[in-house]
Image: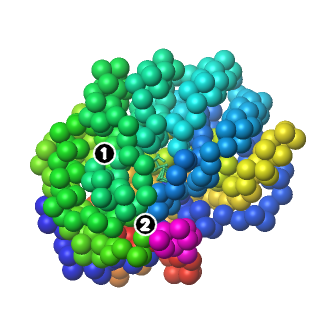
Amino acid sequence: MNINKELLKKYNVPTPRYTSYPPANFFSDNFKPSEATDALIKSNEENTQNISFYLHIPFCSQLCHYCGCNTHITHNKSLISEYVETLKKEILLYKKILSPQRKISQIHWGGGTPDYLDIKQIQEIMSIFYENFNFIDDAEIAMECHPAHLTYDFMNELVNLQFNRLSIGIQDFDKDVLRNVNRVLPILPVEKMVAFLHENKIKVNLDFVYGLPGQTIERFSGTIKKAVSIAPDRLALFSYAHVPWVKPHQKILEKYHLPDAETKIHLFEKAFNILTENGYVSIGLDHFSKPDDELYIALQNKELSRNFQGYCTKKTTGQVYAVGVSGISQLDNAYLQNTKNLKTYSESIDKGVFPFEKVYFLNKNEKIVSYIITEIMSNRFISFKDVEQKFNVSYDEIKEITKIDYDLLTVFENEGLIKINKKEISVTYQGMFFLRNIANLFDPLRKQTEKQFSKSL
Ligand SMILES: C[S@@+](CC[C@H](N)C(=O)[O-])C[C@H]1O[C@@H](n2cnc3c(N)ncnc32)[C@H](O)[C@@H]1O
Ligand code: SF4
């Protein structure tokens, strides 16, 4: 597969990643606490489907210089234990709000580095869930892990706690690249780790980042070939987002020669080809799976969805309730983001108050745009007939709400990125590399915003 380089150059412009609509930098701190609590109560009354929980563990032992996540580098054990105690209280605050009829379908531990916690702390938190909530039969219990903390004993305990999916941050197998970005190396060989997890029925995702200093086509191809030989169930290929105005430590990497946009395209293209020639299929742009994976089956049935934690099936995901600093609850009607400050977080929870700091309440029109953008980003398809029925609006109203620019749409069609068939738009195979740009066509805020996003590649 060759990606059209001319179009890549043309569309490599700052564009939201659309993990939410509107994007998180539109969230505001101008709200009354009662409005946020009302949104929580409403989420429980209006949509009684499954519950997803997101747990944010911000701590890491060492800062990777490329990192764009919400992290707190510490070796202070008592700070971490206090945080775990607060987290447990926050989960119990949710118990008071959420109806016992609703079952947990998904728990996602993210970070930071959740496996930096002691296994006892993870056991205590999972006990709170198991003792206070009901679960669907095949709930997904997942954790993002740094391989530097994964020992056999630790993984064995995760098996006992019914974890069934681990995402392991590899980034690159090349030790020089990892050294350049100040990354701690794994303790066990990754192939042994994955074999152990597979023997214990835990599915494995491996994360890679391209665009890091020191990566060359040859070396990165070696990394991806090694990944294929390890045979993870899923694999993510993230484009390095260099945003030093948000994450000043990333400036450190500017002392190296960072791969330019053209090299990044070649790195991605080569990796894409290795993966697709070796039995992987693409989900969205940057995720890959085996063809029998539930995500790929959902994509074929137009049942794929997406939230801050990544791709998921519409069946598994529910409204997301986030616990921990910086976590974002993703409800049908609102986004509620917790404070990023550890002290403010624990003070608020100790008073029995949800620690929301920034929120966004979606009106009906924004929910329509959010739905359209999520469908494009996940299922590469949108039927305006479905939108008409789902939201009880006319096609003319949809056009007005999204402020679709028909001339631009025709340009994308002529470039072979989308196909338009009456009231349906589907993204072509080539168009898949431009998903963010295509989604942007339906974003009425696209012209209004001068806020900075990373480039779309
Ligand atoms: C929370 S981390 C995963 C767990 C653990 N902290 C680790 O590093 O292995 C989530 C993933 O985000 C990706 N990531 C972090 N910073 C990034 C950036 N600036 N650009 C693109 N991807 C990034 C990495 O692939 C990383 O594995
Ligand atoms: S990449 Fe992972 S381990 Fe490294 S600083 Fe970021 S969250 Fe922590």
Say which label, 2 or 1, has the lower sequence index.
1
Residue at 49% x, 30% y is: 141
> At 30% from the left edge and 72% from the top edge, which residue is drawn?
259
Q: Residue lying furthest right in this view? A: 351
Q: Which residues are magenta?
A: 243-252
Indicate whether 75 appears above or below 22. above
Question: In the rendered view, how is the structure colored?
Answer: rainbow
User: What residue type is disc 1 on?
Assistant: Leu
Asked if the stretch drawn in magenta spans residue 204, the answer is: no
Residue bearing the label numbered 2: 241
User: Which residue bears the numbered disc 1?
Assistant: 235
Query: Which amino acid, by three-letter code, is at mark 2?
Result: Ala
**Height in image: 67 above or below 47?**
below
Mark 1: give few (<14), some (14-19) or many (20+) Cα within 10 Å. Answer: many
Image quarter of residue 109: top right
**In the structure shown, which secondary structural element does the residue marked by tag 2 occupy?**
loop
Question: Distance between the Cα atoms at labels 2 and 1?
Answer: 18 Å
Where residue 268 appears, x then y in whole percent?
A: 24, 62
* Residue nearest the observer in this picture, 18 or 362: 18
